Image (tube, helix red, strand yellow):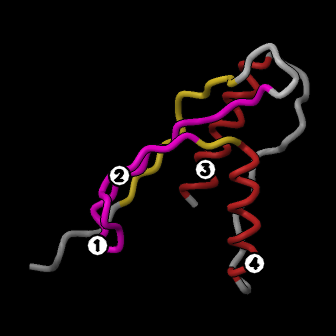
């Protein structure tokens, strides 16, 4: 019998507005990772990150990716619709980015 298949699950959830009502408010998201990969010492981790940190991560990946395409991030612009809808669309886009 072969070794079990390596699986990694990542979820972006629980968006929260920080510094609500002030000029420097922002939304951060809980990122939950679970894996059985031997490459990770911690099998689960949970951190909160904001959009600009995803932008930083994507830049680092692009710098080191060579010819491998780096997934897109959801758009930064706030278009029509409620703030809640925008935050949910962004949450889904950030999760797709991390899964890819």
Query: Residue at position x 52%, y 37% from top?
Result: 30
User: Which one is closest to the eye, mark 3 or mark 4?
Assistant: 4
Q: Is residue 96 magenta?
A: no
Label 2 and label 4: CA atoms lie apart by 26 Å
- Disc 3 designates what residue? 96
- Disc 1 designates what residue? 38
Query: What range is drawn magenta here?
Result: 25-48
Say whether disc 3 or disc 4 marks the residue closer to the N-terminus: 4
Helix or strand or loop: what does disc 4 sit on?
helix
Helix or strand or loop: what does disc 1 sit on?
loop
Above or below, comparing residue 3 to residue 11 in the picture: below
- The quadrant the N terminus occupies is bottom left
User: Which one is closest to the eye, mark 2 or mark 3?
Assistant: 2
Q: Nearer the viewer, residue 71 or 55?
A: 55
Say whether disc 2 or disc 3 marks the residue closer to the N-terminus: 2
Residue 63 circle label: 4
Specify the quadrant of the image occupied by residue 5.
Answer: bottom left
Say whether disc 4 or disc 1 marks the residue closer to the N-terminus: 1
Q: Is residue 29 magenta?
A: yes
In the image, residue 49 lies at what x, y percent?
61, 43
Query: Residue at position x 17%, y 76% from top?
Result: 3
**Contact between labelled residues 1 and 4, with CB atoms less than 8 Å apart:** no
Helix or strand or loop: what does disc 3 sit on?
helix
Residue 34 circle label: 2
Horizontal arrangement in the rendering, residue 88 relative to residue 21 (left or right): left
- The quadrant the C terminus occupies is bottom right
How many residues crowd mark 3 within 10 Å: few (<14), some (14–19), many (20+)? some
In the image, residue 81 lies at what x, y percent?
84, 19
Horizontal arrangement in the rendering, residue 83 relative to residue 96 (left or right): right
């Amino acid at each position: 019998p072969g070794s079990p298949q390596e699986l990694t699950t990542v979820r972006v959830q629980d968006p929260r507005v920080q510094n609500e009502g002030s000029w420097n408010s922002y939304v951060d998201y809980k990122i939950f990772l679970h894996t059985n990969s031997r490459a990770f010492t911690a099998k689960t981790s949970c951190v909160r990150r904001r959009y600009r940190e995803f932008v930083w991560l994507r830049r680092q990946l692009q710098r080191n990716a060579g010819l491998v395409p780096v997934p897109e991030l959801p758009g930064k612009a706030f278009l029509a619709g409620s703030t809640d809808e925008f935050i949910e669309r962004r949450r889904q886009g950030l999760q797709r980015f991390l899964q890819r």
